[in-house]
Amino acid sequence: MELLSINGAYGLCESLYDITPDEDTFEDIALEAWRKINNRHTRLYRFIGSVSKGKLKLPCNVDEIESVHIPIPDAQVTSDLSYDFWTENIWIESYIDHRKHLEDPYWTRGKLVKYDEGNNELIFAHDYPRVMVVYHGIIVDDEGLPLVNDKELSAIATFVAYTSLYKESIKKRDGNLLKLAQVVKEDWLRQCNAARVKPYLNQNDMDRILDAKMSWNRKTYGKSYKPTL
């Protein structure tokens, strides 16, 4: 699935609705549409930083944190009578970490540490010179804007067109423009619902979802009620 820049909604709005959005407010309106659709295209990131005064600033694209590590083998001992026993545990844990690192993309070598989440930062009980954060991050372009698929891009362009018409109708006190904005709003609602359906879901999958959500007996012999997106 190819992901596109959200800026493409600007030209698409002009092509589909012959409306030129305001450049100063386009980005804010497009991001509002993206939040309303509420889809997130993410991938796994690993971020390394140092904890200062108990806090670690996170990257701006963090969506969900998977784990937080410090580069110390998580070797547990039950007795302090033998140093060799502790050293042997470190070797064993290092070997296990190496195997897991090769087999599981979510696994990161090192000891897990406890933390609290703040305002785009992590809060720790101690300072650490090196901390690795494994997180699911939103895929963004070079400008830091989220990437979207083609259905989401079309819905965003429609929302921008609706917002532009609505603002213009209010400014000019024009009832005809307001009615036209309502027509485009209906198109936005339809495209928003379509964009929320994942691309990998086929019509049979949607049919099963509707069966579970609506009723076990939606079918009439000889007729089809598959949704059209």
Image: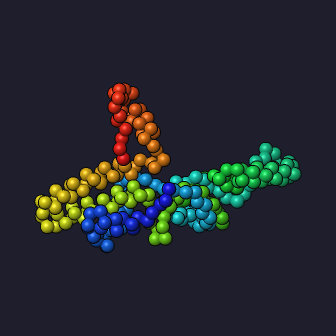
Is any atom of residue 141 visible in this view?
Answer: yes
| Residue 54, position as x, y percentages in the image | 58, 62
| Residue 63, position as x, y percentages in the image | 50, 56
Going 42% across and 41% down the picture, which residue do you hit?
A: 203
| Residue 44, position as x, y percentages in the image | 58, 57
Quick one: 69 or 106, which is closer to the camera? 106
Is any atom of residue 127 visible in this view?
Answer: no
| Residue 169, position as x, y percentages in the image | 17, 63
Corner quadrant of residue 224: top left
Is residue 106 rendered to the left or right of residue 87? left
Outermost front residue: 222
Q: How is the image coloured?
A: rainbow
Going 25% across and 60% down the picture, which residue do you hit?
A: 162
- Total label count? 0
Is residue 137 rendered to the left or right of residue 111? left
Quick one: 11 or 23, which is closer to the camera? 11
Is residue 200 rendered to the left or right of residue 18? right
Going 61% across and 61% down the picture, which residue do you hit?
A: 46
Going 39% across and 55% down the picture, which residue do you hit?
A: 151
Quick one: 188 or 224, which is closer to the camera? 224
Is residue 39 rendered to the left or right of residue 168? right
Corner quadrant of residue 214: top left
Outermost bottom residue: 24
